[in-house]
Amino acid sequence: MPSRFETFAALHVPGDPVVLYNIWDVGSAQAVARAGAKAIATGSHPVASANGFPDGETVPIAFALANASRIIAAVELPVTVDFEGGYAVDPGALEHNFSLLAATGAIGCNFEDQVIGGEGLHPLPLQSQRIAAARRGTGANFFINARTDLFLKNKPETHDAAMVDEAIARVLAFADAGASGFFVPRLGDLKLVEKLCRASPIPVNAIAYPGAPTKAQWATAGIARISHGPFPLNALMKTFEEMARAAIN
């Protein structure tokens, strides 16, 4: 019988993407599980927003790990955790933090390359070292979804083939360092997506945002995983506010 790690990894099929409808607590995880999800994924932004924190590692690490543990205990599906930048820059500290994450029972994580609280992205050699540290901390089977914020940090009209070449250099290095998947939020030009997917040695993850390509379009371009980020929580809170307004007034 395959392990939860193997089950989760096998969901990542280029051209037949697994959909991860991001959640933030036990209640939302159970709702997504009842909806027929094959796996559960937290999102750092919705976890932060639902608990009164700004996004960007302002949720204390102890809170984030405890929240993950509660979710994992409450559902039978594999759970991957958005671990942002790992709450450290130094590879040694990262290895320790990722060992704590693995101890929650999570089978994977998102791990981003932007400088949390700073500007730009970590240099490629350093980010590769950071991914290698995360791998040491989690073990061989943990699904490390290495996120690049290259496209998120640049306006869509600037996304071009040269930027994709830079992303390809990152994914090749990240894969060599131990990454299991590659997350490119906000890259929506399907020709560029297809170029990246063809060159990537590991499954590529896109995000569904307002105006993004459809699931079928992502699939045709070679995407293996579609996340939904903060958008489900945002929509839910808007509806909740409207319901409250109608009831109060």
Image (cartoon, rainbow, N blue to C red):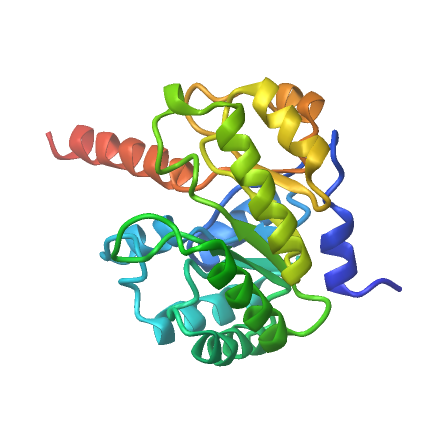
Rendered location of residue 237, percent (x, y): 30, 38
Relative to 13, is 217 on the left or the right?
left
Query: Can you tell which quarter of the image residue 149 is in?
Result: top left
Q: Is residue 76 visible?
A: no
Q: How many marks?
A: 0
Residue 87: percent from the left, percent from the top?
38, 69
Extreme residue in the left direction: 249
| Quarter of the rendering occupied by the C terminus | top left
Q: Give the image quarter of residue 24.
A: bottom left
Of 32 and 78, nearer the camera is 78
Please tell me which residue is depicted at 23% across the width and 29% down the height of the picture.
242
Q: Write the residue at 38% across / 52% down.
A: 114
Q: Nearer the viewer, residue 114 or 220?
A: 114
Q: Residue at x 60, y 39 (%)?
A: 168
Q: Residue, x 54% and y 24% (percent of image)?
A: 161
- Asked if residue 99 lies left or right of residue 238, the reply is right
In the image, residue 128 sits, relative to residue 98, either above or below, namely above
Of residues 22 and 248, the one nearer the viewer is 22
Q: Is residue 6 above or below residue 96?
A: above
- The quarter of the image holding the N terminus is bottom right
User: Residue 37: percent from the left, percent from the top?
Assistant: 64, 44
Q: Position of residue 85 (x, y in %)?
A: 41, 61
Judge whether 114 appears above or below 222 on screen. below
Answer yes or no: is residue 143 visible: yes
